[in-house]
Amino acid sequence: MTVARLRRRLLVRGVVQGVGFRPFVYTTAAELALSGSVSNDNSGVVIEIEGAPADLDAFTERLRLRPPPLAVIESVDQAEIAVRGGTGFHIAGTTSDGSGRTLASPDVAICADCERELRDPQDRRYRHPFINCTNCGPRFTIIASLPYDRERTSMADFAMCDRCAREYADPADRRFHAQPIACPDCGPALAYSGPGSGAPLAAARELLRAGGILAVKGIGGYHLACDAANEAAVAELRRRKRRGDKPFAVMVPDLATARAIVEVDDAASALLTSPARPIVLLARRSPPGAGFVAPGDAAAEGRCLVPAASVAPGNPDLGVMLAYTPLHLLLFGLPGDPPGPQVLVMTSGNLGGEPICYEDDDARTRLTGLADGWLSHNRRILVPCDDSVVRALDGRELPVRRSRG
Ligand SMILES: [Zn+2]
Ligand SMILES: [Zn+2]
């Protein structure tokens, strides 16, 4: 007796685009020797699988129990359809029929694997400010329309090089179907304008070290940054932004630096390192101004970690976030770079009360007079997004301002 073959169509809804869902379906189907296809449509992800009934059930179970880490499945609708035969499983092009809505994933902080490559002089993406993979990188802010495919994102401006194209097409590669895939040969490029000279990042870091105010094009818009330990720089930024007494948030390169300036318990640490990397309001370490400097760097210029009084005047709390893009990490510097500020005021690029700047020309106009220098790049931001602010309360997350993530 032969085992009957069945074919099923699954419609998966939720946060299923831009989270490595199709590569996950591909590899799972391949492991179970199922044939069929997977595609994005306007409603979510459409999967057709064909094979022995027990294997089809196993597929659905894995989908429900072990989806990709960033996916949030809201529903799975299944229907039996006519068997087609055939072998092999493929990732089909996107179809635009289907109504309803799908949720694109939020932008996701650089993952540990990409950060390792960013720091590895042997890696071909060493110091590449736009490194990303299936599990991390820009999503929401680069999408012109759904379904989520490269040609509908601002990465459509950049033709993949051969090596990136091979990684993109290789189911065994961790950049399989990573839509924003890029490398130094084919990806976006940085540009700097302002005082100083040299490579864009080096010039920008020098401006910060010297107490200047830098406009930085991030993932969801422009930030204004300055050395948080430099009272004159912070006070000047406050004056130019017409900020009044409202506290500034700071960005630090890692958890260890955060621990040096604020009280970080387990709940706070989980929030700080979560993929959304929100600004977390935390109690300052007391006594304040104890003069903590980076270990082994006590005399190094620009290494003071104590936030200046003007960062959050009279406030016992400090809003802290960890660097969440490769560009931020490079701004703090990698081994071999000259020392630079390790705590940066990072505030949205706008005048008090105005929306965040995210288009280059608009930023140029509106931020003139606010910034001394500009660190920009040619990947367009299509959807502006400000940083989220949260507070940890009794181990729970309490949103103060929801945005990124
Ligand atoms: Zn990654
Ligand atoms: Zn490339």
Image (cartoon, helix red, strand yellow):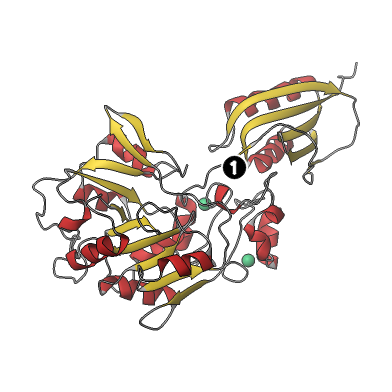
Count of numbered badges drawn on the protein: 1
- Left or right of 118? Residue 162 is right
Front residue (pair 290, 219): 219
Front residue (pair 275, 315): 315
The type of residue carrying mark 1 is Val
Residue 53 position in % (x across, y down): 79, 20
- Left or right of 275? Residue 71 is right
Q: Quadrant of residue 352?
A: bottom left
Q: Residue furthest top?
A: 1
User: Mark 1 — residue?
Assistant: 19
Residue 130 position in % (x across, y down): 52, 62
Mark 1 falls on what kind of element? loop
- Left or right of 282? Residue 274 is right
Residue drawn at 37 percent across, 58 percent down: 351
Residue 181 position in % (x across, y down): 61, 58
Residue drawn at 28 percent across, 69 percent down: 340
Residue drawn at 24 percent across, 54 percent down: 244
Front residue (pair 212, 229): 212
Does mark 1 have its CB less than 8 Å from ligand 1? no
- Left or right of 29? Residue 109 is left
Residue 382 in the image: above or below residue 90? below
Residue 140 at least partly seen: yes
Where is ligand 2, by quadrant?
bottom right
Residue 243 position in % (x across, y down): 28, 55
Q: Residue furthest bottom?
A: 197
